[in-house]
Amino acid sequence: MPRIAYVNGRYLPHADASVPIEDRGFQFADGVYEVVTIVDGKLADADGHLTRLARSLKELSIPWPVKPATLRFIMAEMVRRNRARHALLYIQITRGVAPRDFKFPKQPAPSLVLTCRRTAFQPAATLEKGVAVITMPDIRWLRRDIKSTSLLPQVLGKQKAAEAGAFEGWMVDGQGFVTEGCSSNAWIVTADGTLVTRQPSNEILNGITRLSILDCMRKLGIHFEERAFSVAEAYEAREAFISSASTFALPVTRIDGKTIGDGRPGALSLRLRQAYMDHIGSTDPVSVK
Ligand code: PLP
């Protein structure tokens, strides 16, 4: 697969793509992003990701660098030029280049960058075993509903999880309730069989995969509760999983070293993974390689 990037109107070989050092994304993390998964050459949940991108831009008063319809065209062009089959499309918009000053530039010229990277998603072995997560304090700001490029807490969290041999970190608020994963939403199936995920608010990023899984559940008539759950409740859960554009619904079988349920991916988690894969039109529902 060739690696072609898009930077402010130009398609370039990835290695040659760059932005100026006074880009406010580089100086202040003054930008937003989206990750859209490409499965079988098709963009998954593109409408949802573009809707959230529009919201993130609006919340931060960053103007669109191009019209939304043009961005859609660029996205399709990136799939084509990269000959992408299973890949991740990264889209970043910053407030653009300006002399370093905290205040917004008077005439902002927002930057638009897209990159594309081939990915293998989850190998069958991962799906058979499920993944481990560890919990950690949520040290982020209070506008987590904006998909900002300011990700230092998640960088530290993911590193801590990796050092502990875990796939993901679940962040926990001051009251002992799980907010979400460092780059995913968190779900449990309680001991009495209720599917629970935290309600959208400023305290979590409202995942596009999360929203689609909830839609799948409504269609399947599966009952769920949108509420906060504690770490203690998660330890006692029958099943757990995470959701994100790149992991879909991915079963969690260990939390802080404790075995969840019978230690194997839960039936409901796998059913929802399949439902989500059907929703995005994947031909290889459970294990996309
Ligand atoms: N929560 C956080 C903090 C994230 O960074 C992400 C994705 O990167 C998600 C949730 C899942 O969102 P989505 O399903 O849109 O990928």
Image: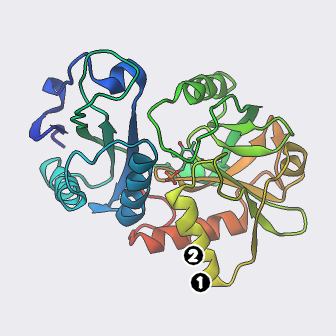
Can you tell me whether the CB of the residue at mark 1 lies under 8 Å from the nearest atom of ligand 1? no
Residue placed under numbered mark 1 in the picture: 219
Q: Nearer the viewer, residue 221 or 18?
A: 18
* Residue name at image x 35 percent, y 29 percent: 104
130 shown above or below 137: below
Label 1–label 2 contact, CB within 8 A: yes
Figure check: 73 above or below 10: below
In the image shown, does 83 or 100 lie closer to the viewer? 100
Is residue 135 depicted above or below 164 in this figure? below
- The residue identified by callout 2 is 216
The vertical placement of 243 against 108, above or below, is: below
Residue 188: which quarter of the image? bottom right
Tag 1: residue type?
Lys
Can residue 289 be spotted in the picture? no
Question: Is residue 192 in view from this perspective?
Answer: yes
Alpha carbons under labels 1 and 2: distance apart: 5 Å
Q: Residue at x 76, y 62 (%)?
A: 196
Q: Position of residue 256 (x, y in %)?
A: 80, 35
Residue 69: % across, % down: 20, 62
Mark 1 nearby-residue class (10 Å; few <14, some 14–19, many ≥20): few
